[in-house]
Image (cartoon, coloured by chain):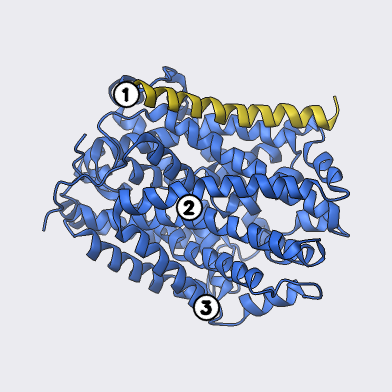
Amino acid sequence: MGWQFNMIVILALVFGGTGWCVYRTIKAEDKK
Amino acid sequence: MAERKNTDQWTSRWGLVISCVGMAVGTGNIWRFPRVAASQGGGAFVVALMIGLFLWGIPLLMAEAVWGKVSRMGVIGSFKVMMGPKWTWMGTAVALICLGITFYYSVVVGWCFRYLAYALTGVIKPGLDAEALWASFSGTPGAMVPWHILTMIAATLVVLRGVCEGLEKVNKVMIPMLFILLIFLAIRANMLPGASEGLRFFFEPKWEDLLKGRVWLEAFTQVAWSTGAGWGLMLTYFVYTKKREDIALNATTVCFADTMAGLLAGLVVIPTIFALSPDPSAAVGSGNTGLAFIHLTNLFTIMPGGAIFAALFFLSLVLAGFSSLLAMVEMTIRFFLDAGWSRRKAALIAGLGIALFGLPSAWDISFLDNQDWVWGVGLLLSGLIFSIAAMKIGVNKIWEEHIAPDSDIKAAWMFKLIYLFPLWFSIIFIWWIAQAASWYPDTYMKWLPISEYTFSVGTMFYQWAIVVAIALVTNKWLTNRSRFPFEPTE
């Protein structure tokens, strides 16, 4: 595994985690 | 005079979340995260940090949020409500530790404003000796004072306008702008010839580093200092939430967004250094201020379009630092509001007080370094206070009564990990103390003069002892003064 793969995994983990939280927040706001 | 029942609370969850992210994302995300991540195994460090978020940051932020939402009072009053009048001193100790940071953090944000002004007025240009510039600014007594005062005037003007019109409106502009700036700067930095060497250094898989204790200690320390967990700031912002608010999701969002900001800053700083610096290891190995105000500033002078890059970089530092400072000033004035003062009077007194008590740090950088050391490590104690308090009340009880009913994330384990906090605290605390003892092998308990024993063990213990003594002596008085909780209208 090269550093490029490593970079993609880490960015996906952190950006994906933040994105998921934002998505859940938007969903909760919509429900109101 | 009682604080009148008003509608000055967050207008939406977005307002709350963005302000909490602003509280967490500070200068440390931009100048500490990239440096430490790059020198501690890159990807391995980020994995350790993510685990640290769950073991340290998220449970503590959840506890803080409960304190604020249930008590509707600032740090001091919240401990009175949650633990009983005998334990108000615990809140006072947390508040004083955070206040100790606030006094010098305003000076740090003042530096960022100064360097933004340098960039905008064309001082950062080819031929500049960045080391001499920093030495003259930080080493001349009084040079930092006007910037500290200006910063405090700006922060006071924002909190004076209240939660909805001040904090929420300003954060809603600053935080999206900060992320957009970091993305733009990261793209530009990675277009520099040779930038990919920086990315390789940052992301090279060094999974064996996960076996090194130092990587874990640095990752947990970064979580403690970066997420704002245990500072009492999340607590303060949750005073103004609506009656129903999702604590688990908000705490998780803050931690992930905080890490994202650090990672983006890493994508700006490390590739820039590797593309332009003749000695990248020295730049990465330098301290926080050395990295931003000397190494990077030097690189901006030789970079194509460096003046614009420098202005945007220091603007992002200003946005990150100022949004955190606002939370600290609000934490400070919340006590006065709990005592029944008007926001106007409370903001003016708090602003003036912070400006005055920040003067020693603005005058002498060795005093600031000392305060950064004493209260930075002191934050670990604040976290311990929250974890012990949560266990005394009952972790299950807090989860079932205050978090689970309004939470989309039904993962009780996320909060129950707070049981392990004393273990992490002990390991990291002992590590820091052992390190500090090795710096002054024969005189580690000495603390005066501060300019000589800036980072000693003694300087920490004695100043902490003073804070705990003040908290205990004033317990009854502060308990009686904390009487006017915020009353949410919806």
Q: Which residue matches tag 2?
A: B378
Q: Looking at the image, can residue B17 be seen?
A: yes
Q: Are marks 3 and 1 on the same chain?
A: no
Of residue B18 and residue B152, the one placed in the foreground of this image is B18
Chain in blue colour: B
- State how far apart marks 1 and 2 are (Cα): 41 Å
Q: Which residue matches tag 1?
A: A32
Q: Position of residue B382 (x, y in %)?
A: 42, 46
Query: Nearer the viewer's eye, disc 1 or disc 2?
Result: 1
Tell me which corner region of the image, top left, top right, bottom left or bottom right, holds residue B436: bottom right
Q: Position of residue B362 (x, y in %)?
A: 51, 74
Q: Are marks 2 and 3 on the same chain?
A: yes
Tell me if residue B203 comes above or below residue B126 in the rendering. above
User: Helix or strand or loop: what does disc 2 sit on?
Assistant: helix
Which hue is chain A drawn in? yellow
Q: Which residue matches tag 3?
A: B363
Q: Position of residue B231 (x, y in %)?
A: 43, 48
Quadrant the N terminus of chain A occupies:
top right
> Is there a contact, CB below 8 Å, between mark 2 and mark 3?
no
Tell me if residue A2 comes above or below residue B356 in the rendering. above
